């Protein structure tokens, strides 16, 4: 397995040391840096190729959730926090996993394996340039061929992604960001942190909602301007 570059972001030195020690048990994990705040982490990301971030939520000045929202193309993010109540927000931001302190080495390895799986999925797609009008998705023990022109929309569902086509709905165990990377077609656009839609399937737009196949999908405030531009509006 190729070496994966990791970044640890936590304002507690002991917590950083524990994660760093856990990383030493997996030979393919290499720690590029450990940081005590989000601004140090931004500097590291600007200067290095990072594959996985172990990210605390309660950081000084800029918390982990807000920090993730500032990243246009984030690596695989594994949240490490003492607070359970932020899990939903974390998964809405397409986090790979959410570890509640104190967590065991076994639970840490499970999270890393998820990140590796997502990275491998992205790598396979990038190495196969012929997949321009469809994607192969594994769900419920089957592998589905999804034609991009038949895909209506996709919705983030924690560790899963709800994929809705003209003929079926499937729930593959793939993160939202990894699924988005499968969509090489220019048909698709993210209209909300939890929704990607097929532009050609838009029936109408009203206020901060778009109608597709009689389903009302919200348009996030930070996405609306770009969405309308893509539609030539």
Image (cartoon, rainbow, N blue to C red):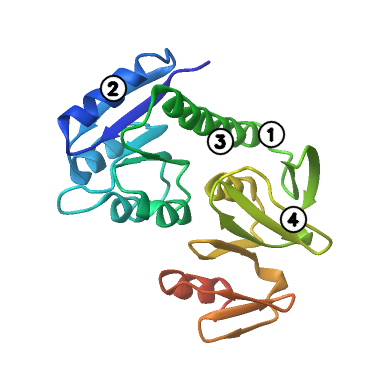
Depth order, front residue of 28/57:
57
Which mark is in front, 2 or 4?
Answer: 2
| Secondary structure under the numbered disc 4 in the rendered image | helix
Q: Quadrant of the C terminus?
A: bottom right
Depth order, front residue of 158/46:
158
Residue topped by disc 4:
148
Tag 1 near tag 4, CB within 8 Å: no
Depth order, front residue of 9/225:
9
Q: Residue 52, how many percent across, how many down? A: 40, 33
Residue topped by disc 2:
20
Residue topped by disc 3:
118
* Residue at position x 61%, y 34% in the image: 121
Residue 218 lies, with reference to residue 142, above or below; the image says below
Residues under labels 2 and 3: Cα distance? 21 Å
Residues under labels 3 and 4: Cα distance? 20 Å
* Residue at position x 18%, y 28% in the image: 14
Q: Residue 62, how many percent across, how many down? A: 21, 53
Q: Residue 228, how many percent across, how many down? A: 53, 77
Which mark is in front, 2 or 1?
Answer: 2
User: Which circle's residue, 2 or 1, is located before the other in the chain?
Assistant: 2
């Amino acid at each position: 397995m190729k070496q994966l570059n990791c970044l640890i972001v936590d304002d507690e030195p002991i917590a950083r040391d524990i994660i760093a020690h856990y990383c030493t048990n997996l030979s393919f994990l290499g720690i590029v840096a450990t940081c005590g705040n989000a601004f140090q982490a931004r500097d590291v990301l600007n200067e290095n190729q990072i594959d996985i971030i172990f990210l605390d939520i309660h950081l000084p000045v800029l918390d982990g959730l807000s920090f993730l929202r500032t990243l246009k193309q984030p690596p695989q993010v594994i949240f490490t926090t003492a607070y359970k109540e932020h899990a939903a927000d974390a998964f809405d931001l397409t986090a790979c996993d959410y570890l509640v302190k104190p967590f065991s080495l076994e639970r840490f390895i499970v999270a890393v394996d998820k990140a590796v799986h997502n990275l491998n999925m992205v790598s396979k797609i990038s190495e196969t340039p012929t997949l321009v009008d469809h994607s192969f998705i594994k769900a419920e023990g089957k592998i589905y061929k999804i034609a991009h022109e038949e895909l209506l929309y996709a919705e983030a569902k924690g560790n899963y992604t709800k994929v809705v086509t003209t003929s079926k709905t499937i729930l593959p165990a793939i993160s939202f960001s990894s699924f988005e990377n499968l969509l090489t077609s220019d048909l698709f656009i993210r209209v909300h942190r939890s929704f990607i839609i097929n532009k050609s399937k838009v029936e109408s737009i009203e206020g901060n909602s778009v109608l597709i196949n009689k389903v009302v999908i919200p348009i996030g405030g930070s996405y609306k301007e770009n969405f309308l531009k893509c539609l030539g509006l």
